[in-house]
Image (cartoon, rainbow, N blue to C red):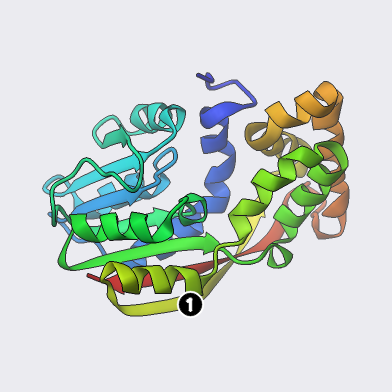
């Protein structure tokens, strides 16, 4: 398990992904509008970005849960928010009663479900009639200049990582809405959300984020030099978008899909 100073692992993922996730977590929760006293599940919660934000909305009388298959992510989520109940569990076999939740949200997890329909059918089971569902997935890679720079860096220094990397950008809103309809959701909607996000100075941030996400595969391919070279490539790719203080304001785009049980 990574400690707070580590450049890799779930702890570092939580730190370096936070500025990118924040505006889309807000959009996700705005789509389901959890209120005081309601119950919310953060599905494929990672380190719990959406769960922590939901807890502030449902208040002390509400209930927030989070599940993820990755036990390392769950350990960090528990440290970040010890009052939220986080459980390591597969998304298609959730440890909850029928109709247990008023709302279910999924922030950047639906790309990785092996059987999307089976997972959303399970999600429908634990959502009360009239309950809300919302998910975000990344729009195609060519809409994401920051992640496109990551792809070029991996192609240059750890090409074997690309088969994992590209999975994050292939889930379409049509696939999501079709699976939601099959699972029993109605009132389906889809819209794009774009946010211009100011990233911290890329001199350190590009290295830290790459190491958090891909450090193991980069080092396996070329040692520490591969991580440093990949980070330099990311910085070079984004040089024309970088301010004098090293920060970079970049557009990120997601598909936001919603449904009602």
The answer to whether residue 158 is above or below residue 39 is above
For the question of whether residue 120 can be seen, the reply is yes
The image shows residue 62 at horizontal and vertical percentages of 15, 49
Q: Nearer the viewer, residue 175 or 200?
A: 175
Q: Nearer the viewer, residue 145 or 217?
A: 217
| Label total for image | 1
For the question of whether residue 102 can be seen, the reply is no
Q: For label 1, count other residues whose C-alpha is less than 10 Å away and answer few (under 14), some (14-19) or many (20+).
A: few
Q: Residue at x 61, y 52 (%)?
A: 167
The image shows residue 5 at horizontal and vertical percentages of 59, 20
Dividing the picture into quadrants, the one containing residue 45 is: top left
The answer to whether residue 21 is above or below residue 30 is above
Q: In the rendered view, does 168 fall on the left or right side of 246?
A: left
The answer to whether residue 124 is above or below residue 151 is below
Q: Residue at x 59, y 39 (%)?
A: 16
Q: In the rendered view, does 244 fall on the left or right side of 18?
A: right
The image shows residue 57 at horizontal and vertical percentages of 25, 55
The image shows residue 250 at horizontal and vertical percentages of 69, 60
Determine which residue is flagged by label 1: 191
Q: Quadrant of the C terminus?
A: bottom left
């Amino acid at each position: 398990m990574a400690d707070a100073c580590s450049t890799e692992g779930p702890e570092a993922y939580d730190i370096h992904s936070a500025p990118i996730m924040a505006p889309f977590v807000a959009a996700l929760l705005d789509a389901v509008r959890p209120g005081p006293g309601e119950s919310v599940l953060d599905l494929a919660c990672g380190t719990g970005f959406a769960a922590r934000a939901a807890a502030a909305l449902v208040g002390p009388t509400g209930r927030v849960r989070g599940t993820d298959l990755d036990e390392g992510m769950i350990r960090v989520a528990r440290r970040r928010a010890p009052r939220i109940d986080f459980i390591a569990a597969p998304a298609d076999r959730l440890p909850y009663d029928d109709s247990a939740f008023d709302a279910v949200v999924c922030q950047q997890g639906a790309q990785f479900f092996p059987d999307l329909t089976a997972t959303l059918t399970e999600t429908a089971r634990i959502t009360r009639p009239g309950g809300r569902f919302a998910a975000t997935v990344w729009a195609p890679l060519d809409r994401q200049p920051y992640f496109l720079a990551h792809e070029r860096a991996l192609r240059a220094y750890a090409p074997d990582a690309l088969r994992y990397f590209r999975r994050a950008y292939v889930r379409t809103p049509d696939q999501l809405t079709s699976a939601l309809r099959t699972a029993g959701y109605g009132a389906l909607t889809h819209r794009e959300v774009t946010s211009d996000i100011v990233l911290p100075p890329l001199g350190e941030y590009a290295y830290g984020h790459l190491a958090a996400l891909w450090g193991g595969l980069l080092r396996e391919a070329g040692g520490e030099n591969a991580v440093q070279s990949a980070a330099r490539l990311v910085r070079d790719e984004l040089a024309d978008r970088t301010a004098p203080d090293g920060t970079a304001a970049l557009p990120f785009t997601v598909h936001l899909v919603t449904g009602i049980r």
